[in-house]
Image: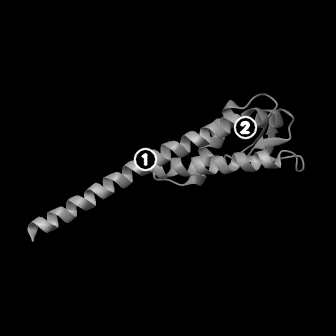
Amino acid sequence: MLRNSFVKISLVGVIAAFASLFSVQAFAQDAATLKKQMEQRLPKVDSLKAQGTIGEGNTGYLVCLKGEQGKDVVAAENADRAAVYGMIAKKESTTADLVGKRRAVQIAQNAKAGEMIQSADGKWNKK
């Protein structure tokens, strides 16, 4: 009886270890895929920012400022950012919203001259 309990506990431990391993591998693979997509999109994002068509919002996401131009790029970038913020939030035991707001501060600090940045109070300013 004791041996059966030990075997069950050991089996549960092994299954948990494998699940954890696959979860870490999936996380790394997803992160790598997201990074690649975002790197490929960066020239278009930078171009749209330079034109003043899009700007960096105070929540860590891109915002269309001039009509519909760049809408697809913004949607794709924001979807990837949401996934990244979610991964970071899970790792740090916080929320994706908080991660995004922290990232928005970093983005604003590193923005190029002329790019549109939304301040914490919601106002848009050219850097």
Q: Where is residue 57 in the image (x, y as percent from the top left)?
A: 73, 46
Viewer-proximal residue, 59 or 54?
A: 54
Mark 2: amino acid:
Arg
**Residue at position x 66%, y 40% from top?**
37
**Residue at position x 56%, y 52% from top?**
86
Q: In this view, does 6 lie to the left or right of 103?
A: left
Q: Where is residue 111 in the image (x, y as percent from the top left)?
A: 72, 32
The label shown at residue 24 is 1
Label 2 Cα crowd, 10 Å radius (few <14 / some 14-19 / many 20+) = some
Label 1 Cα crowd, 10 Å radius (few <14 / some 14-19 / many 20+) = few
Q: In this view, does 7 lie above or below 41?
A: below
Marks 2/1: CA–CA distance: 26 Å
Mark 1: amino acid:
Val
Q: Position of residue 95 (x, y in %)?
A: 54, 55
Secondary structure at badge 1 equals: helix
Regarding residue 120, the answer to whether it shows in the image is: no
Q: In this view, does 121 lie to the left or right of 28?
A: right
Where, quadrant-wise, is the N terminus in this rendering?
bottom left
**Residue at position x 80%, y 36% from top?**
49
Where, quadrant-wise, is the C terminus in this rendering?
top right
The answer to which quarter of the image holds residue 5 is bottom left
Q: In this view, does 56 lie above or below 14?
A: above
Q: In this view, does 6 lie above or below 78?
A: below
Q: Is residue 51 above or below residue 102?
A: above
Secondary structure at badge 2 equals: helix
The label shown at residue 110 is none
Q: State the residue lying farthest toward the bottom.
A: 1
Q: Where is residue 98 in the image (x, y as percent from the top left)?
A: 57, 51
The label shown at residue 41 is 2
Q: How many labels does the image show?
A: 2
Viewer-proximal residue, 85 or 16?
A: 16
